[in-house]
Image (cartoon, coloured by chain):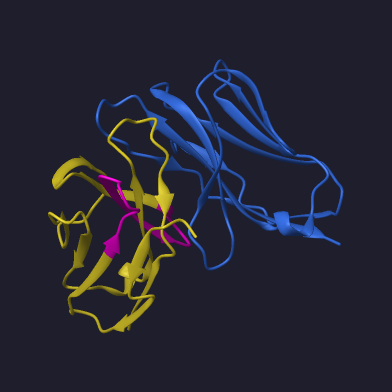
Chain colours: A blue, B yellow
Amino acid sequence: QKEVEQDPGPLSVPEGAIVSLNCTYSNSAFQYFMWYRQYSRKGPELLMYTYSSGNKEDGRFTAQVDKSSKYISLFIRDSQPSDSATYLCAFNGAIQGAQKLVFGQGTRLTINP
Amino acid sequence: DSGVTQTPKHLITATGQRVTLRCSPRSGDLSVYWYQQSLDQGLQFLIQYYNGEERAKGNILERFSAQQFPDLHSELNLSSLELGDSALYFCASSSGAKNTDTQYFGPGTRLTVL
């Protein structure tokens, strides 16, 4: 079983729609949960970061974590064509002095004007 | 622009050869990370250096090695290259070594092995 499962898509929605992206994970040691956005031919950039169960909101983006179900989500409200990118979930265990991020496969998202 | 620079942008080489990828972290960052991104494996962590010392290792092949120099730039050396090593190689940096530090990614080096 893979440590992280993420549907690669592609996912195509009309502008203004609410987008839901999801990942499941199996490693109970993961304590930090992240979403990265990667535009074509660019490096990933951190979008959202959380370490507890519940919701975290930042503008049009909401990250949701359910540790009991080992499930994380990213919601994008009022989606814009500029949100078209690949979204990667990422996880980090609590290893003192080291970071070993484990990424999902990435979901390719297209917002159609 | 993340502030992390990587050279070269593109590299085309033949099987069996050796290449060196270079990364300069953001100003003030002490940690450097290397990742490999391929279509089938996704984005995979290779290795982390903190202030010149190796801190964490992922699924890095024995044919691959890295180092971080006193000026904090890092190099990833790939030897005895195989077709399957064709991928995007990203470098990231963070301020320290805490596992909560944000990693900032460079633009990547696209390696093609023919």
Q: Quadrant of residue B100?
A: top left
Extreme-front residue of the structure: B27
**Residue range corresponding to the magenta coloring:** B23-43
| The C terminus of chain B, quarter of image | bottom left
Left or right: A64 as drawn, with respect to B64: right
Left or right: A35 as drawn, with respect to B21: right
Inspect the magenta stretch and tell me whether residue B40 lies in it: yes
Residue B65 position (above or below residue A87):
below
Inspect the magenta stretch and tell me whether residue B34 lies in it: yes
**Residue B35's x, y, as percent?**
35, 54
Q: What residue is drawn where x is 26% and y is 25%?
A: A96
Residue B37 position (above or below residue B44):
below
**Residue A52's x, y, as percent?**
53, 18
Q: Quadrant of residue A48?
A: top right
Q: How many marks?
A: 0
Residue A97 position (above or below residue A84):
above
**Residue A43's x, y, as percent?**
48, 59
Residue A40 position (above or below residue A59):
below
**Residue B21's x, y, as percent?**
26, 69
Left or right: B88 as drawn, with respect to A87: left
